[in-house]
Amino acid sequence: MNFHRIKNIVALKNYQLKVEFITGELKIYDCKPLLEKDVFKALENENLFRKVKVDTGGYGIIWSDEIDLSESELWINGKTVESQVAEDKAEYNSK
């Protein structure tokens, strides 16, 4: 199994995370859909949401003992920053 270990995590506005992997790749992960699940409800508190950190070894991120996400969730469902920039440009140019 190939793990995409996390180097750094930054909480952004609108319940999004900027994830930097040890390979240098950047992805934006949208946490809003998670807030619908009971286990993630506490993240509606922005102070808690901003306290996100990389778990030991870079195999996930954590907010508390009960709330965490794996590196694979962030890798698979995060949007690559370059592709997001391209999408934004295409949308702007089509207006």
Image: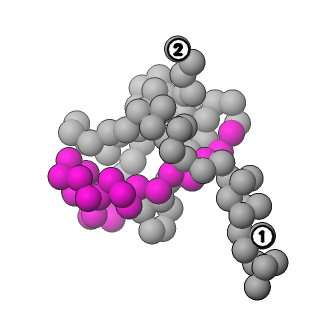
User: Going 66% across and 48% down the picture, which residue do you hit?
Assistant: 80
Coordinates of residue 77 in the picture (x, y in percent): 51, 44
Residues packed near mark 1 inside 10 Å, few (<14), some (14 to 19) or many (20 plus): few
Q: Is residue 60 left or right of residue 27?
A: left
Q: Type of residue at label 1?
A: Lys
For mark 2, give the secondary structure: loop
Say which residue label 2 marks: 1
Query: What is the magenta range?
Result: 25-50
Does the image show residue 69? yes
Q: Position of residue 13 (x, y in %)?
A: 48, 67
Q: Residue at x 32, y 45 (%)?
A: 63
Prevailing SS of the magenta stretch: helix
The quarter in which the C terminus is drawn is bottom right
The single residue placed furthest to the top in the displayed view is 1
* Magenta highlight on residue 40: yes
Q: Residue at x 36, y 57 (%)?
A: 33
Residue type beneath disc 2: Met
Rendered image: mark on residue 89: 1
